[in-house]
Image (cartoon, helix red, strand yellow):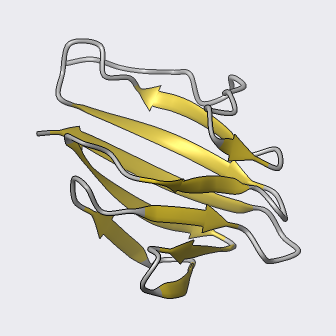
């Protein structure tokens, strides 16, 4: 068993992300093949269009709303909704709402 108590810490803005988006590793990779992050995006915060070579990511919207763009499809998810991006799936994110969006992001290495 492992317990993490880092939820009150301040995260970082990863490279190629913008607008004050903040990501905190709640469960870091640290020797495993997955991590869990809390991503907080204020209005205008998000991530540039990118893909991952060898990871899958699930974005679960805990509060607010987040707009995704894959280059072929654009959609907005709200509280309680989720999306899975498999390796090589392009995705761009932006919070177009007035309220902050809080997402739980689960990343799994293939």
3 over 15 or under it: above or below: above
Q: Please state the horizontal and vertical placement of residue 88, each as a whole percent of the image.
A: 25, 55
Give the side of residue 20 with respect to residue 87, left or right: right
Of the 4 image quadrants, the one containing the C terminus is: top left
What x and y, as percent, mark residue 37? 48, 39
Q: Which quadrant, please, contains the N terminus? A: top left
Q: Residue 58 placed where, x, y %?
A: 34, 59
Q: Residue at x 35, y 20 (%)?
A: 3
Query: Viewer-proximal residue, 61 or 68?
Result: 68
The answer to whether residue 11 is above or below residue 42 is above
- Outermost residue to the right: 98
At 59% from the left edge and 30% from the top edge, which residue is drawn?
7
Say above or below: 2 vs 77: above
* Residue at the outermost top position: 31
Farthest residue, direction front: 71
Q: Quadrant of residue 16?
A: top right
| 100 relative position to 61: left or right | right
Q: Is residue 23 left or right of residue 95?
A: left
- Position of residue 68 measured from the top left corner of the image (x, y, whole percent): 54, 74
Rendered position, 49 above or below 96: above
Instruction: Please tell me which residue is depicted at 61% across the width and 54% down the height of the picture.
Output: 48
Where, by quadrant of the figure, is residue 84 drawn? bottom left
Q: Quadrant of residue 67?
A: bottom right
């Amino acid at each position: 068993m492992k317990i993490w108590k880092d939820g009150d810490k301040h995260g970082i803005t990863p490279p190629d992300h913008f607008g004050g988006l903040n990501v905190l590793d709640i469960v870091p990779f640290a020797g495993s093949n997955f991590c869990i992050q809390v991503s907080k995006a204020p209005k205008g915060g998000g991530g540039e269009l990118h893909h991952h070579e060898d990871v899958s990511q699930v974005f679960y919207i805990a509060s607010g709303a987040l707009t995704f763009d894959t280059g072929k499809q654009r959609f907005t998810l709200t509280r309680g909704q989720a999306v899975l991006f498999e390796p090589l799936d392009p995705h761009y994110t932006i919070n177009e709402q007035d309220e902050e969006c809080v997402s739980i992001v689960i990343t799994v290495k293939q």
